[in-house]
Image (tube, coloured by chain):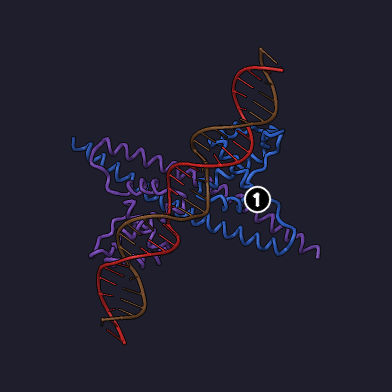
Chain colours: A purple, B blue, C brown, D red
DNA sequence: CATGGCATTTACGTAAAAGTCAATTGAGAG
DNA sequence: CTCTCAATTGACTTTTACGTAAATGCCATG
């Protein structure tokens, strides 16, 4: 496991700009350490970025991603906080399950659409 | 099957503003008919809105949604067009499959996070 | 030492997707 | 016909998630 990654390494790996990674730092999503002024990203930061990209692909906003990332962190020590956290996690999971339903429906409709196209192609192929 | 829906009916059903539905009309995603100036949404428009909302929840932009909606329409009559369409559909499906992987990973991590919380709760429960 | 090549900071810009507001308009109730 | 209330239109504003440009720092290499 590498100790540090430079900002440009990560921009290449995740296909984002330096601006974007700095933006995520401003938003408190990652906290790379500094050597002088240059950012050094640790494996944990890299993993966070991976999670951020996943969240983005799923259409979550930065705020939602921030919430999700909070959930991955160490569980809080206080019972009330823990129960609240569990409730929030359950909500997010319901959200994701809805997305999954949406996704399956969309995939099914696209399957149908493709089939129509193929059928149409066969018709045209037969008639020529 | 009802013949027409008013704009406010649909805003209530889908929990969006009238502004949003008009915006979708401006964008050419729906084309309700008019009686005078009032919009009459047909079942097909309603179904389109349902598809738009699904796309939104999955994080697709308006343009992407427009593309997807195109795919649901009647297949084109020309072979070249049909092949292009099939290619596009396949791309979208790959996109959706990526989203599905992202989704499953995120769900798995949230499961883990919840488990950590529950464990922590048990610990605390035992110690008191 | 100067040249090239990343990095950083600061500041302003921008596209997408609506929200908001004001001024009208139309259609049905009385 | 008049009143009222929902619907429309158009203009302007807002939020999110970065993009872009300018000025400058850091450092290795010839």
Give me the residue at 62% from left, 62% from top. Answer: B87
Residue B122, percent across and down?
25, 39
Give me the residue at 34% from left, 40% from top. Answer: A86
Residue furthest to the left: B128
As drawn, A34 above or below B54: below
Nearer to the camera, A27 or B99: A27
A110 left or right, relative to C9: right
Residue A16, percent across and down?
42, 62
Residue furthest to the right: A127
Residue bearing mark 1: B72
- Secondary element under disc 1, as helix, strand or loop, is helix
Nearer to the camera, A116 or B6: B6
Chain of the residue where label 1 is placed in the rendered structure: B
Give me the residue at 81% from left, 62% from top. Answer: A127
Q: Is residue B1 visible?
A: no
Q: Residues within 10 Å of mark 1 (few under 14, many from 20)?
A: some
Nearer to the camera, B96 or B60: B60
Q: Quadrant of the N terminus of chain B?
A: top right
As drawn, B71 above or below B128: below
Residue B76, percent across and down?
72, 57
């Amino acid at each position: 496991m590498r100790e540090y990654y430079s900002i440009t390494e990560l921009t290449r790996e995740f296909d984002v700009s330096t601006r974007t990674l700095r933006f995520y730092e401003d938003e408190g999503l990652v906290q790379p350490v500094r050597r002088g002024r240059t950012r050094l990203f640790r494996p944990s930061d890299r993993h966070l970025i991976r999670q951020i990209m996943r969240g983005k692909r799923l259409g979550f906003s930065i705020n939602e991603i921030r919430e999700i990332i909070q959930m991955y962190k160490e569980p809080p020590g206080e019972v009330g906080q823990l129960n609240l956290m569990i409730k929030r996690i359950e909500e997010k999971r319901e959200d994701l399950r809805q997305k999954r339903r949406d996704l399956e429906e969309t995939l099914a409709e696209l399957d149908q659409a493709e089939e129509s196209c193929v059928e149409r192609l066969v018709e045209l192929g037969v008639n020529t």
